[in-house]
Image: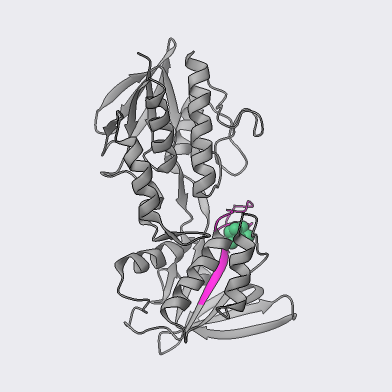
């Protein structure tokens, strides 16, 4: 029986692995953490229908529990091609051989500390979108570091994306709609709280995204201000004072919020970049993996027997990652046959 190794146990890796098992392949899924689920397990609810992420993950895991050999706490550090087979070696010394390898190594969130002027890691009440999801999951209410319910919350779009200074010119695709979803969730918990979203352009490309954005304005009175945050500082009450250029009204704006949420974008994971260099795969200008053909062969790496699944080849939402994962399984099947 042909053996496929899937590197990465996020939703894309799990989906590709479970389909390959159903096709009759022997599949080993290697995950560096002690549990599967990747970023989705850290998310409280998914856009645009605010469906619990745990529910989606449970459905994917239920399928994947059947027949996949799971190898946790194992980080693959080297993949070498040896006469039609691949030898994979992990940092803990674990080794395996495969007839085909699927890279489902995902993404990392942009490190918001690199945008020093926004104050993440410096001021008490500057958090990221992922920190806000942690707060939703903890279920103790939205609060400042001083344990107060915020009266004003700001969301800053495009943190580490579409940003020449950060070196990332691409759009991360999911953070506009995530900001809208999170703003609504905050408003549902704290109806009296004023919420501001600071954006450059709003990219509501997906099905029902536009409707959610409209609902955010009309039902929840969330204010969308077109303008880029130039600087954040902290006052004596630990509020975050923002300097923003309102690019629609063409005037500078100064506003204090009790909590500032930075919408960190997606960046290529270090593991993805290391494999790309080791296997000699083509580098895209944004550091994600570049397929042979982005339209016709989006899962083919250009290296025989190595395939992409999910966000290792660029930003995607959960639904698109799963669709890509299924297409990766078909590409592997075609290759092995
Ligand atoms: S999805 Fe929105 S917030 Fe995210 S990078 Fe694109 S424009 Fe910016």
Which of these two is toward me, 198 or 284? Answer: 198
Q: Measured from the top left, where is residue 42 in percent x and y?
A: 36, 56
Q: Of helix, strand and loop, which mostly describes the magenta segment? A: loop
Residue extending furthest toward the bottom: 236
Q: Judge whether 79 appears above or below 54 on screen.
A: above
Q: Measured from the top left, where is residue 115 in percent x and y?
A: 52, 64
Q: Judge whether 214 appears above or below 167 on screen.
A: below
Which of these two is toward me, 24 or 155? Answer: 24
Q: Is residue 160 magenta-colored?
A: yes
**Residue at left offset 48%, top offset 24%:** 306
Q: Measured from the top left, where is residue 55 in percent x and y?
A: 37, 53
Residue extending furthest toward the top: 83
Q: Judge whether 187 appears above or below 325 on screen.
A: below
- Total marks in image: 0
Q: Is residue 289 magenta-colored?
A: no
Position of 137 with respect to 205 (left or right) is: left
Q: How is the image coloured?
A: one colour
User: On the image, which quarter does residue 136 sit in?
Assistant: bottom left
- Look at the image and give the residue range highlighted in magenta: 154-174
Q: Measured from the top left, where is residue 221 in percent x and y?
A: 58, 81
**Residue at left offset 41%, top offset 17%:** 99
Which of these two is toward me, 167 or 334? Answer: 334
* Rendered-image quarter of ligand 1: bottom right
Q: Is residue 10 visible?
A: yes
Q: Quadrant of the N terminus?
A: top left
Q: Is residue 75 visible?
A: no
**Residue at left offset 74%, top offset 76%:** 248
């Amino acid at each position: 029986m042909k053996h496929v190794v899937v590197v990465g146990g996020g939703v894309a890796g799990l989906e590709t692995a479970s389909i390959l098992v159903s096709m009759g392949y022997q599949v080993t899924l290697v995950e560096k953490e002690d549990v599967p689920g990747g970023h989705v397990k850290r998310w409280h609810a998914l856009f645009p229908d605010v469906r619990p992420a745990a529910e989606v993950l449970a459905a994917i895991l239920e399928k994947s529990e059947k027949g996949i050999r799971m190898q946790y706490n194992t980080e693959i550090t080297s993949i070498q091609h040896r006469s039609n087979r691949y030898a994979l070696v992990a940092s803990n010394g674990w080794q395996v051989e495969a007839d085909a390898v699927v890279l489902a190594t995902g993404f990392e969130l942009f490190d918001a500390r690199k945008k020093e002027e926004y104050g993440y890691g410096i001021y008490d009440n500057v958090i990221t979108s992922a920190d806000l999801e942690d707060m939703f999951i903890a279920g103790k209410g939205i609060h400042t570091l001083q344990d107060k319910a915020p009266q004003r919350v700001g969301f800053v779009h495009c943190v580490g994306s579409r940003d020449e200074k950060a070196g990332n010119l691409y759009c991360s695709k999911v953070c506009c709609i995530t900001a809208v979803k999170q703003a609504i969730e905050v408003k549902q918990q704290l109806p009296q709280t004023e919420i501001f979203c600071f954006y450059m352009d709003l990219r509501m490309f997906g099905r029902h995204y536009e409707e959610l954005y409209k609902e955010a304005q009309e039902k929840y009175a969330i204010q969308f201000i077109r303008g880029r945050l130039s600087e954040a500082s902290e006052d004596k009450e630990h509020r975050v004072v923002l300097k923003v250029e309102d690019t629609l009204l063409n005037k500078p704006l100064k506003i204090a919020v009790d909590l500032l949420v930075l919408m960190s974008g997606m960046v290529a994971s270090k593991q993805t970049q290391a494999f790309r260099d080791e296997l000699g795969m083509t580098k895209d200008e944004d550091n994600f993996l570049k397929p042979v053909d982005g339209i016709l062969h989006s899962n083919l790496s250009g290296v025989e027997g190595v395939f992409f699944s999910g966000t290792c080849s660029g930003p995607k939402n959960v639904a698109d990652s799963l669709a890509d994962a299924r297409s990766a399984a078909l590409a592997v099947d075609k290759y092995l046959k």
